[in-house]
Image: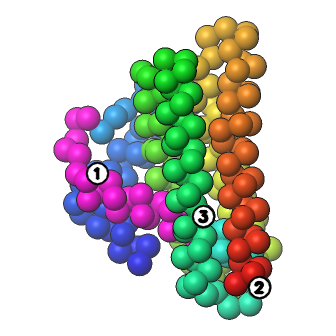
């Protein structure tokens, strides 16, 4: 299912994965405005990202055989956390009038998330074949650390323009990135244990 959604996203909106990868090595953030946007292309790439993250969480916390019900439950939790996070982002954007920089940060976050999902997918297949959650946690942890390092580096360049801005960016990272991730991991672990 995940592979099909990734292939459909690339088929419907050609270059979506390639542009995400190339945007990580340029100095200024590249946007998809030059490429034709497609609702279904965006839908399938979001499905691929959410499914890959859900699968990685399931493989980290599973005890025994993988079950599709756990996967769907974790997908639901991820969608709920992402919707809550989007609402908080809209409130912060409305309050502090950060629309231009905020849209660049969202574009960058989306590009990094796409590349992280493309890297995670084959690692998940390897981990499912091995069947050892410890190895899976190390592989997924390394990819996530790389994801957050890129996000902090590129996102910090957008928002840090004074010494006080470093404090604000640190508060933003803790409240809008790490706190939702902690809630997501806690709810997912509890759900997998219950199911």
Is label 3 in contact with label 2 (beta carbons under 8 Å)?
Answer: no
The secondary structure type at the circle numbered 1 is: loop
Q: Is residue 98 above or below residue 137?
A: above
Q: Residue at x 51, y 43 (%)?
A: 86
Frontmost residue, 136 versus 95:
95
126 left or right of 87 in image = right
- Residues packed near mark 3 inside 10 Å, few (<14), some (14 to 19) or many (20 plus): some
Residue 163 position, x and y percent, is 73, 10
Report which quarter residue 149 is drawn in.
Answer: top right
Report which quarter residue 128 is drawn in.
Answer: bottom right
Residue 39 sits inside the magenta stretch: yes
Frontmost residue, 121 versus 101:
101
- The residue that disc 3 covers is 77
Q: Nearer the viewer, mark 3 or mark 2?
A: 3
Q: Quadrant of the C terminus?
A: bottom right
Which residues fall within the magenta stretch? 33-55
The secondary structure type at the circle numbered 3 is: helix
- The residue that disc 1 covers is 15
The secondary structure type at the circle numbered 2 is: loop
- The residue that disc 2 covers is 63
Frontmost residue, 70 versus 29:
70
N-term mark: 1 or 3: 1
C-alpha gap between disc 1 and disc 3: 29 Å
Asked if residue 58 can be seen in this view, the reply is yes
């Amino acid at each position: 299912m995940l592979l099909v959604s990734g292939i459909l996203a690339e088929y419907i909106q050609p270059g979506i994965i390639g542009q995400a990868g190339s945007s990580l090595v340029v100095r200024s953030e590249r946007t998809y405005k030059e490429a034709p946007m497609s609702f279904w292309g965006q839908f399938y790439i979001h499905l691929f990202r959410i499914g890959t993250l859900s699968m990685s969480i399931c493989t980290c916390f599973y005890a025994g055989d993988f079950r599709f019900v756990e996967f769907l439950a974790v997908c639901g939790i991820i969608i709920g956390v992402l919707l809550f996070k989007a609402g908080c982002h809209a409130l912060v954007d409305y309050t502090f009038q950060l629309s231009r920089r905020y849209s660049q940060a969202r574009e960058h976050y989306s590009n990094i998330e796409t590349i992280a999902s493309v890297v995670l997918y084959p690692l998940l297949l390897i981990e499912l074949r091995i069947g050892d959650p410890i190895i899976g946690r190390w592989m997924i942890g390394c990819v996530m650390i790389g994801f957050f390092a890129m996000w902090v580096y590129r996102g910090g360049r957008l928002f840090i323009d004074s010494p006080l801005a470093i404090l604000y960016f640190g508060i933003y990272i803790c409240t809008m990135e790490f706190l939702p991730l902690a809630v997501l991991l806690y709810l997912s672990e509890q759900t997998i244990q219950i199911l």
